[in-house]
Image: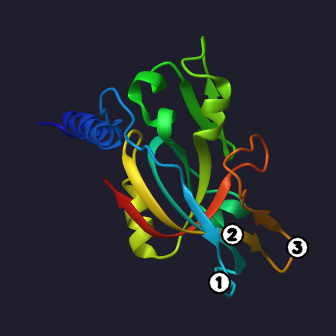
Amino acid sequence: MNWKVLLFIGVVGFGAFHHFQQRGVIHGPGVIAPNIPSQKSARQADIQMNGFSLTPLEHYEIEARVLSREDYTFGIEAQLSPTDLAVGWGPMSDETILKKINISQGNRFYYWRVDAFPIPQRQIEIHSANMHIIPADDSVKRKLSNVRQGQLVKIKGLLIEARRPDGWHWRSSLSREDTGNGACELMYVTELYIK
């Protein structure tokens, strides 16, 4: 075999492996994450990380279906949060409903579009969120790298406000009912489980 054939086989093999690793998970009809996220007051000291000061705002725990993921490598935010997860719970974890909603991410936002609403618009808004994930350690970072669309995940940690000495700041939403700019959760993740 010449090198061109070997190269072709290698490229095709890598592409197939990557597709297999990144393919979405299918669960079938029905709600797979029935509970709303849990949030309670956090009273603890700031966390120092990579030149950022992270102020805990609330303890946060969520079990949700991954609707989409987007990785980032450029910008100040990427130094802190390399991945955004768009997640859904309640009706937004039901495959029957999700088949009728086009979901995408970009520029740190989560977008959805429908031809006809499978559930009321407000139900989509309050049962889904875009989360900026800040891994607390290498173990969480490794697990995060394996998360893919469709999976059920359980995530624990803190909603935070991040600051740098130069005045830059980034603050988490503390509500599940807001939408638009500032509505995303900025989460320092201490535990992540793929179920």
The image shows residue 95 at horizontal and vertical percentages of 40, 28
The amino acid marked with disc number 3 is Gly
Q: Say which of 48 and 18 sits in front.
A: 48
Q: Is residue 180 above or below residue 187?
A: above
The image shows residue 132 at horizontal and vertical percentages of 61, 56
Mark 2 or mark 3, earlier in chain: 2
Q: Residue furthest bottom?
A: 45
Identify residue for label 1: 47
Of discs 3 and 1, which sits in the foreground?
1
Q: Give the Cα separation between the discs numbered 2 and 1.
A: 10 Å
Q: Is residue 149 above or below residue 164?
A: above
The image shows residue 171 at horizontal and vertical percentages of 76, 63
Q: Is residue 173 above or below residue 19?
A: below
Q: Give the Cα separation between the discs numbered 3 and 1.
A: 17 Å
Q: Is residue 44 above or below residue 26?
A: below
- Tell me the tag on residue 167: 3
The amino acid marked with disc number 1 is Ile
Q: Is residue 7 left or right of residue 31?
A: left
Mark 3 burial class by Cα count in 10 Å: few <14, some 14-19, many 20+ = few
The amino acid marked with disc number 2 is Ile
Mark 3 or mark 1, earlier in chain: 1
Q: Say which of 84 and 74 sits in front.
A: 84
Name the residue located 47 percent from the left edge and 23 percent from the top edge. 97
Q: Residue furthest top?
A: 116
Q: Say whether residue 111 is visible.
A: no
Question: Which secondary structure, mark 1?
Answer: strand
Q: Give the Cα separation between the discs numbered 2 and 3.
A: 16 Å
- Tell me the tag on residue 160: 2
Labels 2 & 1 near each other (Cβ < 8 A): yes
